[in-house]
Image (cartoon, grey):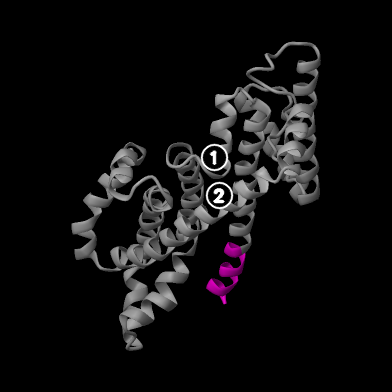
Amino acid sequence: MRSGSTWSSNIERMASLSGTRDLRKRKIASRPTLSRQRTLVYGVAGIVAVLAIWQCAEWLHLTNPLIVSSPADVVKAFIRVTSVGELGSAVISTATLFAVGFGISLLIGIPVGAVLGWYRSINAVADPLISLAYALPRIALIPLVVVCLGPGFAAQVTLVVLLAVFPIIINVASGISTVTEDNLRLARSFLATDMDVLWTIALPGAIPAIISGVRQGVNLGLAGVVVAEYFIGSSGVGGMIFKAGLTLDTSKAIVGALVFGLAALALTLVLQIVEQKFDRWRTS
């Protein structure tokens, strides 16, 4: 009772100070949370609504079929390219290119980033060069890459690595460098070596930054695959999109774009699962 009367008196005091007659009628700001199931339902409903509006716009002749196809036409194009095996072979080619290019990016990016984040003298020398290379529009290097390696698979992989490796290096180095002096002094008191500190303190603490870098590397790596298949060899799903654009087959081009979108979504979900696994290791 006492707390209730105190609350009422506080409201009356605030009302008298602010000039508001009754603060009880004010709607207090709130941000309700959504369950995972409801979030999924809302997401699916949004996609269905967009597809329905898109299809209705085509039925009402509000869109130009040479520029924007309808969902029904996209489904027909998907069935057509799947039945003849064109999409399957293109997906295999694209997946191989991405796996090789992104795998090399991981093998280079994580160790190099760890070294730069741990050794400050090396980082002082390499950081300006890496920052310059990251800011450089690396797509502009396509002619140089083709001249050096030829219009083949090696040039495509090189372009994917050039796009994907730098965000991995930068984020890993940033995560490793956040080790505090208190943690270092504690590790030294137990006679820990550099490798002990890297494995037990620096790497677990840098997991969020590493995962963030890998996510950026995935997105840029997929973009590198598209660009490489567009301009170097015209193979895979990117080459399929390029050829469909030349023949004004927008439905087929949208099918290829959806393949890249679904691939990015699937890889993001995999990285979320990996991050959860590593979070358990980091906190254990």
Q: Position of residue 204 (x, y in %)?
A: 47, 70
Amino acid residing under circle 2 = Thr
- Residue at screen point 25% across, 54% down: 127
- Residue at screen point 31% across, 70% down: 181
Find residue 177 and report its image quarter: bottom left
Q: Is the magenta stretch mostly helix, strand or loop?
A: helix
- Residue at screen point 49% across, 39% down: 234
Front residue of this view, candidates 34 and 115 = 115
Q: Is mark 2 on a helix, strand or loop?
A: helix
Q: What element carries label 1?
A: helix
Identify the residue position indicated by label 2 in the image: 94
Q: Position of residue 172 (x, y in %)?
A: 39, 60
Horizontally, is 160 left or right of 12 in the view?
left
- Above or below, comparing residue 266 to residue 10 in the picture: below
Query: What residue occupies the far front of the structure in this picture?
Result: 84
- Above or below, comparing residue 233 to residue 70 in the picture: below
Q: Which of marks 1 and 2 is nearer the N terminus?
A: 2
Q: Does the CB distance between marks 1 and 2 fall below 8 Å? A: yes
Amino acid residing under circle 1 = Gly
- Residue at screen point 23% across, 64% down: 120
Alpha-carbon distance for marks 1 and 2?
8 Å
Which residues are the magenta region? 274-284
Q: Does the magenta segment cover residue 51? A: no
Q: Residue 238 carries which label?
A: 1
Find residue 195 and report its image quarter: bottom left
